[in-house]
Image (cartoon, rainbow, N blue to C red):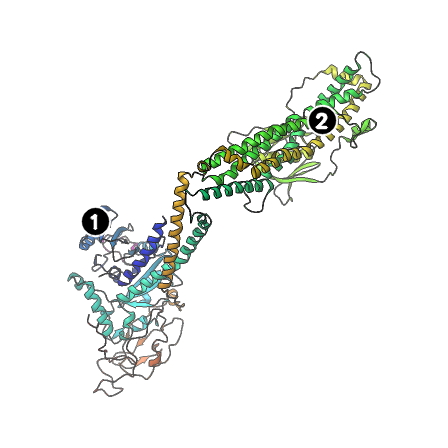
């Protein structure tokens, strides 16, 4: 005998599992755990066992479940059980399973009523179950017996809370009918972890053991002490039935007979009993599956959308079709050209947000790296003056010159212009490297055809190398052109007349003193650990000073350093450091900051370092020269001893500075233009117009368009995945239409669970009078006021407050909050008084409750099944 409701769900879940396994994924339905909570000997194990439909749990009087039993139900074609502590053994006889549970419990807890929080893990494989987890927990007890510890109540409650706190667990709060419901620890604990009552179902057991003349109708109708999901009454097998091996099927028939024949429960018999509890729990599982479906559907749809575009080209795919190969080759070469152009020229779509690439990196070379390289070779003042003095003396020869010679100016200028060749050629090399990287990035899309990718890379790279030679020749030609004629009539050239006045202005290069050149975070790297170690600050570089602040709000200034006499030098990266460092120092050997001769500033990348150096150049802070100075005191004295020579040196020095500035400006402008024209634009044109012809001449089409084995496998996998995803979505759609979810019941006033008020008796005697209608319930601090029976001897009168009830037959279910309630099968009719008893006369035997029939319709064949 299995659980019928569960068996209806099994094909549905199996469909989903099959759909997901076909796409190589697991279907994470994560069905809820079902945990039974209640007092000792409340009938928890019996309730759980009925849900499985198998007789395998130990039962008896006193504390029987002394360790949590985690029961995993797993759908399988064969039926057997296995324990985690003895995996190798498969149990097919469920009597042996019960004996093993008892033996394993005794092994850890002893035989004298001891308990343990260490769970027993049991797996039951069966064709009649869903993949579910059921948890049988020890009963709540208050007084230790046998080997139990003094804090037995606390330990058991902690153990139970550990299992029922999970959001995905359904709580069956089991309370025996012969105990006051307001004393139920199970309901109290359920309320702690589930204050909204969304996953708590009240289960009332032992209805057949209530005192004669009492019933639990008001509780089962969810009136007296209401729960959001209401109560379900069950009648389990007695200990005598268990010992007599009474079959579960027979027990269920007896339970149905009890509810149909009992006058207090007859009208709601369809909403009572183990089958209804199974139906309610299975509806919860259905609800859970339906709630999981939208997220599963959206996950599958997003996967399907990501595959759509790629699958489109494979739908009518024939690997050996020459037409398809030609078309694919043309499309790929065309796409390669478009991608290359987009990466160089920039584009709004497919923007890389992680790093600079293509054209942006080349732009950085043109406007940051190249100007920096030019300034780095700026002449050293002392060496330059010495060279000018030698030039003047050598030009005059044996004679003493009265005038400043033109040839000295020309010789020094030409020497400085020749020095421009190295940074210009270095700039070309950097651009070539970026172009080749860009080509590699663009050919990554040709990965499906390894030969085509390899040939494309080889042809384009070879062409770039060819253009490299022509570009470098042109740049060298530009410099030779500059050397060929020194134009002293240039409009920006200061001329001999202004050379003397120029000397005082050269020291003031910064035109806008307060202009902010750059802001950003830098780390001062060389502060000693005793003084706080390296620390990050917000730096502001202006045309006159470098300041740093605590943060970017620029309110708390830490220091301001004037830029006079400052220079930059490179610092090697530390062994354990991943930062890139440069230093600022004073050329006059003074401390720069506190007792530091230099400040070491650290950035995260070399690109940041280069960018900061370029900013310092704009502020007039130049890099240190790597040179060995051979100072000659006599020469310096010679300068000071010959005022005329000194004036001539100063004049030529200013003229050279002016003219080299003009050349630098011209080269900085022409270099990017030359490289763009001769290399980058030429490469773009080559890719668009000639690459295809080169590809056809290098190899035949079939070899170029030969797929890699990985690509063929990937295509097959993608098509299979695509069809499996569509099938899974179709199955989910079928499940959505073939299952129905029940709405969450409305909240009820369950303040009685929190109030801690005095216990409310849940049993009430059945009425011996037939009042025409009961007054409505008086709502007080608790939803159901206690009913106080009158003193002995008075059978027909009650002390106020009145009992909550229904005013008339047509409103029998008006006050019922049970979401699973259904109208009774037997229609309400006026109550009939048994013959022989006049109306209003009390009887020793309580008659049927008012407004409910006492006759069982013969149309119900399942009465005694």
Q: Give the CA distance from mark 2 to mark 1.
A: 95 Å
Q: Earlier in the sequence, mark 2 or mark 1?
A: 1
Q: Nearer the viewer, mark 2 or mark 1?
A: 2
x and y percent of residue 705 in the render?
Answer: 45, 39
Please rate how many residues cluster around mark 2, counting C-alpha atoms within 10 Å: few if below 14, some from 14 to 19, many from 20.
Answer: few
Pick the residue in front: 727 or 85.
Answer: 727
Residue 466 as seen in the image, left or right of residue 214: right
Question: Residue at the location (76% across, 24% down)?
Answer: 653
Total of numbered circles in the picture?
2
Q: Are marks 2 and 1 in contact (CB under 8 Å)?
A: no
Please rate how many residues cluster around mark 1, counting C-alpha atoms within 10 Å: few if below 14, some from 14 to 19, many from 20.
Answer: some
Disc 1 designates what residue?
90
Q: Which mark is residue 481?
A: 2
- Up-down: is 230 above or below 62? below
State whether the magenta stretch is mostly helix, strand or loop: loop
x and y percent of residue 327 in the render?
Answer: 48, 44
x and y percent of residue 158 in the render?
Answer: 33, 54
Where does the magenta region start and end?
142-152
Residue with the most extreme top position: 398
User: Which quarter of the figure is the C terminus placed in?
Assistant: bottom left
Q: For numbered disc 2, what is the local secondary structure?
A: helix
């Amino acid at each position: 005998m299995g659980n019928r409701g569960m068996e209806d769900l099994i094909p549905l879940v199996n469909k989903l599992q099959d759909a997901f396994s076909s796409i190589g994924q697991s279907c994470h339905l994560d069905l809820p755990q079902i945990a039974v909570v209640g007092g000792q000997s409340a009938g928890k194990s019996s309730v759980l066992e009925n849900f499985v439909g198998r007789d395998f749990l130990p039962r008896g009087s006193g504390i029987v479940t002394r360790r949590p039993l985690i029961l995993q139900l797993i759908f399988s074609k064969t039926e057997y059980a296995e324990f985690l502590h003895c995996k190798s053994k498969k149990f097919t006889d469920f009597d042996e399973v019960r004996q093993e549970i008892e033996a394993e419990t005794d092994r850890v807890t002893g035989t004298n009523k001891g308990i343990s929080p260490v769970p027993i893990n049991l797996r039951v494989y069966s064709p009649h179950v869903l993949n579910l987890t059921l948890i049988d927990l020890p009963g709540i007890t208050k007084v230790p017996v046998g080997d139990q510890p003094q804090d037995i109540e606390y330990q058991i409650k902690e153990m139970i809370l550990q299992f029922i706190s999970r959001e995905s667990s359904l709580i069956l709060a089991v309370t025996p009918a012969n105990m006051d419901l307001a004393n139920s620890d199970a309901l109290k604990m359920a309320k702690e972890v589930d204050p909204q009552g969304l996953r708590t179902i009240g289960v009332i057991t032992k209805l057949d053991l209530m005192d004669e003349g009492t019933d639990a109708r008001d509780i089962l109708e969810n009136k007296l002490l209401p729960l959001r999901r209401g109560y379900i009454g069950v009648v389990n097998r007695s200990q005598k039935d268990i010992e007599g091996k009474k079959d579960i099927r027979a027990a269920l028939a007896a339970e149905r007979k009890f509810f149909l024949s009992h006058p207090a429960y007859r009208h709601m018999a369809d909403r009572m009993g183990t089958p209804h509890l199974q139906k309610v729990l299975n509806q919860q599982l259905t609800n859970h599956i339906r709630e999981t479906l939208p997220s599963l559907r959206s996950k599958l749809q997003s996967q399907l959308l990501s595959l759509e575009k790629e699958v489109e080209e494979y739908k009518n795919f024939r690997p050996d079709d020459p037409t398809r190969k030609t078309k694919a080759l043309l499309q790929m070469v065309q796409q390669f050209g478009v991608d290359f152009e987009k990466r160089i020229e920039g584009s709004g779509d497919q923007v890389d947000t992680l790093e600079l690439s293509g054209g942006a990196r080349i732009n950085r070379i043109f406007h940051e790296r190249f100007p920096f390289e030019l300034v780095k070779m700026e002449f050293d003042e002392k060496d330059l003056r010495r060279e000018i003095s030698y030039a003047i003396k050598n030009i005059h020869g044996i004679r003493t010159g009265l005038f400043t010679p033109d040839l000295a100016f020309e010789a020094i200028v030409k020497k400085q212009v020749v020095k421009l060749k190295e940074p210009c050629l270095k700039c070309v090399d950097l651009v070539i490297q970026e172009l080749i990287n860009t080509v590699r990035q663009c050919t990554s899309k040709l990965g499906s055809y390894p030969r085509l990718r390899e040939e494309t890379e080889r042809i384009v790279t070879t062409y770039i190398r060819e253009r490299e030679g022509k570009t470098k020749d042109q740049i060298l030609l530009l410099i030779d052109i500059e050397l060929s004629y020194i134009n002293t009539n240039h409009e920006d050239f200061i001329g001999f007349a202004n050379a003397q006045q120029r000397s005082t202005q050269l020291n003031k290069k910064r035109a806008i003193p307060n202009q902010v050149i750059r802001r950003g975070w830098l780390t001062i790297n060389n502060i000693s650990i005793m003084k706080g170690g390296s620390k990050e600050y917000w730096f502001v570089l202006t045309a006159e000073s470098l300041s740093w602040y605590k943060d970017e709000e620029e309110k708390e200034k830490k220091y301001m350093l004037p830029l006079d006499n400052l220079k930059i030098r490179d610092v090697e990266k530390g062994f354990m450091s991943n930062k890139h460092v440069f230093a600022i120092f004073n050329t006059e050997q003074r401390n720069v900051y506190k007792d530091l001769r230099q400040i070491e500033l650290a950035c995260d990348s070399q690109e940041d370092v280069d960018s900061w150096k370029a900013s310092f150049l704009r502020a007039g802070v130049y890099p240190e020269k790597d040179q060995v100075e051979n100072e000659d005191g006599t020469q310096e004295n010679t300068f000071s001893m010959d005022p005329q020579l000194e004036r001539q040196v100063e004049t030529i020095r200013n003229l050279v500075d002016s003219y080299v500035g003009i050349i630098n400006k011209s080269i900085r402008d022409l270099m990017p233009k030359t490289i763009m024209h001769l290399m980058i634009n030429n490469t773009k044109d080559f890719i668009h117009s000639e690459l295809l012809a080169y590809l056809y001449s290098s190899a035949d089409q079939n070899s170029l368009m030969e797929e890699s084995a990985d690509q063929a496998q990937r295509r097959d996998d993608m098509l299979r995945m695509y069809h499996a995803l569509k099938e899974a979505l179709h199955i989910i759609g079928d499940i959505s239409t073939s299952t129905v979810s029940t709405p969450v019941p409305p909240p009820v006033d369950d303040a009685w669970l929190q109030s801690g008020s005095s216990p409310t008796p849940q049993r009430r005697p059945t009425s011996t009078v037939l009042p025409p209608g009961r007054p409505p319930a008086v709502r007080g601090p608790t939803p159901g006021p206690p009913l106080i029976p009158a003193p002995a001897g008075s059978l027909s009168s009650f002390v106020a407050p009145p009992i909550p009830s229904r005013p008339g037959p047509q409103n029998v279910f008006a006050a019922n909050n049970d979401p699973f309630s259904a109208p009774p099968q037997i229609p309400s009719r006026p109550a009939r008084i048994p013959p022989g008893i006049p109306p209003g006369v009390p009887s020793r035997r309580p008659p049927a409750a008012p407004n409910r029939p006492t006759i069982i319709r013969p149309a119900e064949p399942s009465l005694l099944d």
